[in-house]
Image (tube, coloured by chain):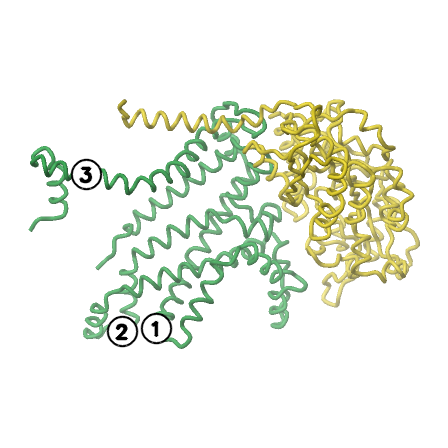
Chain colours: A green, B yellow
């Protein structure tokens, strides 16, 4: 039996040995392939490649937009090490990611499992759960701002009904971050649920039939079949969720402005402040590179731990 | 020509560097002279004239009047808020699209004039009208006039006369010791000990501006005359912050006990007996609680400790140094700085007009807080004063907040702020 790898190898070594007509065909195919990927490559080059290189270059400069960049070597990175607010932002971002990603993934999977059954009004539930994802965060945050209002907000009204005294959610250094995390979880469930739902619907039914015949319970089927088969989806959801969580910005911008006392400030928020409020573009670029490096590390680590997007069957 | 991988990567790298440094082209602005024909299409960036009534005033009244005087000039308006103004300017500068005319806050002139983003204005404009005391000070940098004042906004202390009378207090506090003891007397708690009314609410205005008002009332300064030395890190700055911690400790104030955006203030709701306010509160009271004004239940006074002082902020109008239609831009700056533009703008926002001629206007005569501010303009002090202000102003609230929420002492927070400010100034 000829494997795919052997076929690829044969193709790769082909042109020199192949007759002229076949070589021409291969060249035409290669040109067509290059033409087809060209738009995507150009897009990535212009909107990702050049800004990335520019960010790297600018991170070694002092640049305030108003005057030309001045080379300062590693000064921005040295400043970063001693910047207690940025360290706090890294910690806050990690805490936010640690809580929002797994919790939202677990809830999303649970909801996807429920919505994958023959449930009355399934379409309505799916839409309702997905709506927060497509609603403007500004609008969402404004609603949550009201929910968290210590005097007239819904959260404290519910607690008061239960005989409990609600805190000043967004003014308290103890409660502001949990409050932001809850919004992050709520808003992130929709997309994750959708991906899991799509993955669940493509799972092979023959395996479940075989498992049922073998007497496996539903719980056993979930842990031994569903979860392993969902590994590619889980990997995708995890990576995109971690990246999304590390890039959280708007809810903090609206809900807390990073406060009180920097207790909810995030890496992206500090980058924004350095660049657009303090005119420290070079420093903001250095902060962005730290964020980039962290995300790259986490993605590679996750790939190593979970085995990437290879499904187990 | 052959394109090797190395040559392509080299070209990419050089391109990126060129793109990066190319951004700075906007920085090398030449200061266009304002002579030449008054014509062309110019852009105006404004944090004022918010909402439909503001837009109606600007586009329905002021700009048509300007057009009548300058028929060859077309003005395109870019509305923003103070919160987004800074990033608007940053992105405009980076993109080389700085608006021809821009409205800025007090304290913003030194940073932008220092970087030659703004064009100096003829000094004669400073003598066109009789301006109130020191109103033009924030418009100057390095001895040159860079902007004209449009409206002023001051920070004063407002109080509930009915709650004072209820507690047997007959006059507002003369210094911080009295303020603290009165705040204690005026605060109320429920049976569980939870605050239902604070005696003093300093936190319903921006913490930075509130602390600055207290610093000035303690006869302190932010920076030296040249804007190169930090001056707030002595005992006067620490005491100003300490007072907030003291009133919290007394349980006569609470950091979470403040007015929510878009809702009546704690003073209006009777949830505070004294409150740091902007003079625009008068207009808000007229709209939301006219009975409080009609029954003379609300008063105001100037904060005092070692000296009486009020913070004077406001909005100024300036011309971009890179405007292609410099004469048209300057004409608009001059027009926006006339009493005809200032009065309706101040009226719409409840702000203080900075021209003495307007003291006799019905608006000033009928607005108690504006009148109080104008009567005390000699006690007004402004924030800023250093070219590093844009960076420093961002650090003030977050650093002081660490003390207010109990994470640091007042001295530690002020020392930290002083260090950050010194670093920012050293980068100039």
Instruction: Name the residue rendered at 70%, 57% in the picture.
Output: B262
Q: Left or right of B118: which side holds A114? A: left
Q: Secondary structure at mark 3?
A: helix
- Check disc 2 and report the residue beneath it: A217
Chain of the residue that carries numbered disc 2 in the rendered image: A
Q: CA distance from mark 1 to mark 2?
A: 17 Å
Q: Position of residue B129 (x, y in %)?
A: 86, 32
Which numbered disc covers residue A28? 3
SS at mark 2 in the image: loop
Residue B44 percent coordinates (x, y) = 66, 38
Can you say whether A11 is above or below B141 in the image? below
Q: Left or right: B101 with respect to A222?
A: right
Q: Is residue B304 above or below residue A120?
A: above
Q: Quarter of the image holding residue A53?
A: top left
Residue B330 relative to residue B183: left or right: left
Nearest to N terminus: mark 3 or mark 1: 3
Q: Nearer the viewer, mark 3 or mark 1?
A: 3
Q: Which residue is mark 1?
A: A117
């Amino acid at each position: 039996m000829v494997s795919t790898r052997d076929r690829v190898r044969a193709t790769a070594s082909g042109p020199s040995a192949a007759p002229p007509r076949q070589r021409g065909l291969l060249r035409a195919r290669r040109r067509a392939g290059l033409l087809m990927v060209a738009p995507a490559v150009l897009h990535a080059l212009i909107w990702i490649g050049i800004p990335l290189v520019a960010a790297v270059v600018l991170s070694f400069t002092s640049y305030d937009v108003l005057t030309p960049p001045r080379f300062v070597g590693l000064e921005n990175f040295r400043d970063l090490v001693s910047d207690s607010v940025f360290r706090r932002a890294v910690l806050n971002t990690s805490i936010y990611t640690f809580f929002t990603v797994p919790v939202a993934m677990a809830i999303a999977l649970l909801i996807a499992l429920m919505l994958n059954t023959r449930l009355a009004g399934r379409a309505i539930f799916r839409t309702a759960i997905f709506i927060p994802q497509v609603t403007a965060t500004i609008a969402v945050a404004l609603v949550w701002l009201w929910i968290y209002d210590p005097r007239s907000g819904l959260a404290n009204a519910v607690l008061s009904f239960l005989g409990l005294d609600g805190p000043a959610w967004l003014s308290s250094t103890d409660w502001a971050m949990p409050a932001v995390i809850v919004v992050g979880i709520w808003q992130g469930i929709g997309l994750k649920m959708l991906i899991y739902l799509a993955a669940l619907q493509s799972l092979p039914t023959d395996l479940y039939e075989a498992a049922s015949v073998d007497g496996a319970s539903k719980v056993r089927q979930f842990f031994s079949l569903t979860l392993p088969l969902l590994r590619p989806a889980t990997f995708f959801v995890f990576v995109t969720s971690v990246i999304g969580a590390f890039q959280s910005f708007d809810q903090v911008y609206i809900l807390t402005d990073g406060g009180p006392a920097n207790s909810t400030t995030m890496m992206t928020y500090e980058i924004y402040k350095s660049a657009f409020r303090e005119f420290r573009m070079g420093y903001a670029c250095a902060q962005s590179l730290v964020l980039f490096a962290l995300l790259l590390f986490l993605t590679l680590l996750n790939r190593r731990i979970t085995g990437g997007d290879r499904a187990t069957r | 020509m052959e394109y090797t991988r190395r040559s392509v990567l080299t070209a990419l790298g050089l391109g990126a560097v060129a793109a990066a440094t190319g951004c700075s082209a906007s920085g090398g602005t030449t200061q266009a002279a304002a002579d030449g024909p008054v014509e062309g299409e110019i852009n105006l960036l404004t944090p004022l004239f918010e909402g439909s009534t503001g837009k109606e005033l600007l586009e329905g009244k002021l700009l048509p009047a300007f057009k009548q005087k300058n028929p060859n000039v077309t003005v395109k308006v870019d509305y923003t808020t103070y919160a987004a103004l800074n990033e608007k300017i940053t992105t405009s500068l980076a993109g080389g699209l700085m608006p021809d005319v821009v409205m800025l806050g007090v304290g913003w002139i030194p940073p932008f004039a220092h970087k030659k983003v703004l064009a100096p204005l003829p000094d004669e404009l400073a003598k066109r009208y009789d301006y109130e005391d020191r109103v033009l000070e924030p418009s100057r940098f390095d001895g040159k006039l860079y902007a004209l004042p449009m409206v002023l906004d001051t920070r004063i202390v407002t109080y509930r006369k009915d709650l004072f009378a209820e507690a047997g207090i007959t006059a507002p506090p003369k210094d911080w010791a009295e303020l603290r003891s009165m705040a204690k007397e005026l605060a109320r708690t429920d049976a569980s000990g939870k605050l239902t009314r604070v005696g003093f609410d300093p936190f319903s205005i921006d913490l930075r501006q509130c602390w600055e008002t207290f610093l000035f009332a303690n006869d302190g300064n932010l920076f030296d005359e040249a804007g190169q030395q930090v001056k707030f890190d002595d005992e006067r700055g620490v005491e100003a912050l300490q007072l907030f911690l003291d009133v919290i400790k007394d349980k006569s104030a609470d950091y979470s006990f403040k007015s929510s955006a878009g809702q009546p203030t704690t003073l209006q709701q009777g949830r505070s007996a004294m409150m740091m306010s902007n003079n625009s509160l008068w207009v808000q009271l007229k709209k939301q609680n006219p009975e409080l004004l009609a029954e003379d239940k609300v008063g105001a006074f100037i904060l005092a400790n070692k000296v009486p002082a009020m913070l004077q902020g406001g909005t100024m109008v300036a011309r971009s140094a890179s405007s292609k239609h410099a004469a048209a831009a300057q004409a608009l700056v001059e027009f926006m700085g006339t009493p005809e533009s200032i009065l309706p703008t101040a009226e719409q926002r409840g702000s203080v007009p900075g021209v003495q001629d307007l003291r006799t206007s019905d608006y000033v005569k009928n607005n108690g807080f504006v009148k109080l501010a104008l009567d005390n303009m000699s006690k007004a002090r402004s924030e800023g004063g250093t070219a590093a202000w844009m960076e420093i102003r961002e650090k003030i609230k977050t650093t002081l907040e660490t003390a207010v929420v109990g994470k640091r002492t007042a001295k530690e927070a002020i020392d930290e702020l002083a260090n950050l400010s010194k670093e920012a100034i050293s980068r100039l």
